[in-house]
Amino acid sequence: MLALESLEVAYPGGIKALRPTTLTFREGEFAVLLGPSGAGKSTLLRCLNGLVRPTNGRVSAPGVGDIAASRATLRRHRAVTGMVFQHHHLIGRLTALANVLMGRLGHQSTLRSLWPPSRSDQRFGLEALERVDLLDRALTRVDLLSGGQQQRVGIARAVAQRPRLILADEPVASLDPATATRVLDLLRSICRTDGISAVVSLHQVDLARHFADRVVGVRGGEVVFDGPPARLCDGVLSRIYGARPAEVSVDIVEAPRARRAAIYASRTV
Ligand SMILES: Nc1ncnc2c1ncn2[C@@H]1O[C@H](COP(=O)(O)OP(=O)(O)OP(=O)(O)O)[C@@H](O)[C@H]1O
């Protein structure tokens, strides 16, 4: 459904974040990107909704074609692509419902978006919150919610957009293991029920094993593994992480993002 054709990204300064990559994400698939810090996972994800412009190659979406062909194609693609971020990107002083309703803006004209939300949009937003078990918090300010609850609001916002695709960049990196599992479980089950495709970057190998239909392993801007989670054996993990498998899932996965980078740097082979 979503095709990357010889996609390549070089950032200013010459960093090749993504080497020529050709890949297809299939309809309804829950794909997980795994890879060490700096591997290029965020860059790849951001190319999928045009937040990063490739240096070469293109991303094609069904019914849209090359998403970067024009502002209109990018807008059409983004209208059906929900984003879930590590740090939620919510507006803290607004209620959960108001944040969720932001997911509807891509479906409205500029003029309509200046008016209060319609009843049907409000109902849609409340349904989205109910699906992430937060209906009772609809009118609570988001900055009064826990990290896990905020991430569920982030998912509800993406779902309220009625997306065909959800892109999630380390959606559970700031959460404790039990909350991370619950949040991913919700995300995957909503994607399954609604037939939404998902591309999710994770650092936790165990979560990838549990939730992914397909794992794409990235290292040094290249896809070094592409297959079902059952094939994530020790050899594959060391190909992806360049570390002994026993070292992969404990200290790296539990470490905060900034420290992970230092751990990886010290282990680069
Ligand atoms: N805006 C930018 N300008 C210059 N270099 C960048 C930029 N964004 C990322 N990079 C570099 O591109 C490479 C890939 O970064 P990217 O954020 O895609 O990796 P990642 O796998 O998502 O890492 P992490 O797991 O730490 O988030 C890294 O070397 C990074 O330093």
Image: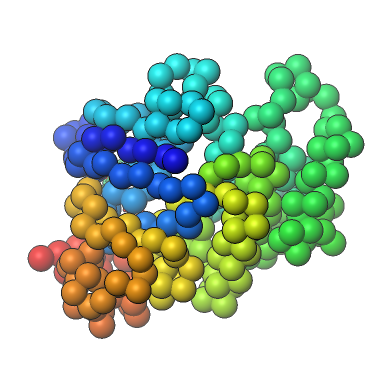
Residue 24, image x, y percentages: 35, 44
Q: Residue at x 55, y 72 (%)?
A: 181
Judge whether residue 154 can be spotted in this image: no
Q: Residue at x 44, y 63 (%)?
A: 213
Query: In the image shown, does 224 or 153 lie closer to the viewer?
Result: 224
Query: In the image shown, does 54 or 213 lie closer to the viewer?
Result: 213
Rendered position, 112 above or below 202: above
Residue 87, image x, y percentages: 53, 53
Rendered position, 226 above or below 177: above
- Rendered image quadrant of residue 152: bottom right
User: Quick one: quadrant of the N terminus?
Assistant: top left
In screen coordinates, is 124 left or right of 155?
right
Judge whether residue 41 can be spotted in this image: yes
In screen coordinates, is 204 left or right of 133?
left
In screen coordinates, is 238 left or right of 116?
left
In screen coordinates, is 222 left or right of 93?
left
Query: Quick one: which residue is furthest to the right in this view?
Result: 119
User: Quick one: quadrant of the C terminus?
Assistant: bottom left
Q: How is the image coloured?
A: rainbow
Residue 76, image x, y percentages: 56, 26
- Rendered image quadrant of residue 50: top left
Query: In the image shown, does 42 or 8 lie closer to the viewer?
Result: 8
Query: In the image shown, does 30 or 93 lie closer to the viewer?
Result: 30
Query: Quick one: which residue is furthest to the left in this view?
Result: 269
Query: Quick one: which residue is furthest to the bottom in this view?
Result: 246
Q: Residue at x 57, y 42 (%)?
A: 164
Q: Residue at x 32, y 57 (%)?
A: 216
Rendered position, 225 above or below 124: below
- Rendered image quadrant of residue 124: top right
Residue 132, image x, y percentages: 71, 61
